[in-house]
Image (cartoon, grey):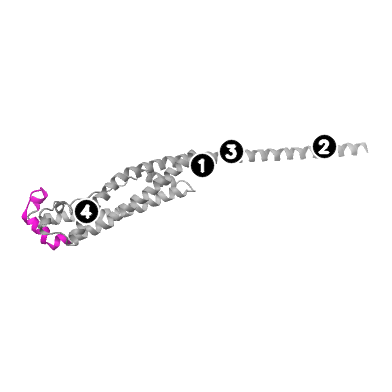
Amino acid sequence: MAGRFTSSKIRSFSENKIGRYILYAFGEIILVVIGILIALNINNRNELKIQAETLDGILKNVKYDLEEDSTGVNLAIKYYESREKFTDKIINNEFTEQDYKTCLMCTSVLVFVVPVDINDKGYLQLKNFQANIAEKDSLSVDVAQFYKKSQSEFDAIGTEVKQNTIDNLQHWRDTYDWFPNVISQKGDPRFIEYITHSQDFKNRIAYYNSISCKSFLHILRKYKKNSKKLLERIDERFESQLN
């Protein structure tokens, strides 16, 4: 009986020891898993912090680009607004023969353009940044959409405005004998006759008015309005971070 008791006691002790070892090992596994989860959480928070700081830097570049572009856009708007008033008068037959004789703008209006080049350094940085993150905030998405649409419109209408100017200049060069005098800013009565009575001049004025003074001017004004809204939202983002 003593042998059986001793054997039973040893077996019980051994089983208890194995049980404690299993519990210990299981506890160790839980601690390791918790440690990994904590490390992942810290790493994720650090990654999000880095992404937020990177985005802030990009938005500052976008803000700089928008502020720089506003100067050129405002100048272009003023230029085409003055040309719109001028060409409207010609289209509406409000010019007299005396007006044509003293018309200084008639020489340059069809052959001069104010180009508008949009700075896109910040936008290109934003595109690259968005391509490498899964979640995008609403402001960065709106900035990207603004630039994508604006570039598309400027490429389409802006290119036509420039090409129309080149076409007018080439047409004058290849068609009229007064071209050398006019291009060198010398007076020529044949040019006065042309702008006063030629349907060709009035047709070109009408097309210029449609493309440059209506379509392109509309795009410039829309760009100015929307860029101002984006600047306000970017400023609000930075101000909220300070509070």
Q: Residue at x 48, y 42 (%)?
A: 240
**120 in relation to 177, above or below:** above
Element marked by disc 2? helix
Range of residues picked out in magenta: 179-202
- Within 10 Å of the Cα at label 4, are there few (<14), some (14-19), or many (20+) other Cα atoms? some
Element marked by disc 1? helix
- Within 10 Å of the Cα at label 2, are there few (<14), some (14-19), or many (20+) other Cα atoms? few
The percent position of residue 130, horizontal first and vertical second, equals 44, 47
> Considering depth in this image, is 224 or 171 the residue closer to the camera?
224
Residue 80 in the figure: left or right of residue 237:
left
Q: Earlier in the sequence, mark 1 or mark 3?
A: 3
Q: Name the residue tied to disc 3.
A: 39
Residue 50 visible here: no
Q: Earlier in the sequence, mark 3 or mark 4?
A: 3
Q: Earlier in the sequence, mark 4 or mark 1?
A: 1
Q: Do tag 3 and tag 4 residues touch (Cβ < 8 Å)?
A: no
- Mark 3 to mark 2 CA distance (whole Å): 39 Å
Residue 47 in the figure: left or right of residue 87:
right
Which amino acid type corresponds to the residue marked 4 in the rendered image?
Arg
- Which label belongs to residue 48? 1
- Mark 1 to mark 3 CA distance (whole Å): 14 Å
Residue 220 in the figure: left or right of residue 164:
right
Element marked by disc 4? helix
Q: Residue at x 77, y 40 (%)?
A: 19
- Which label belongs to residue 13? 2
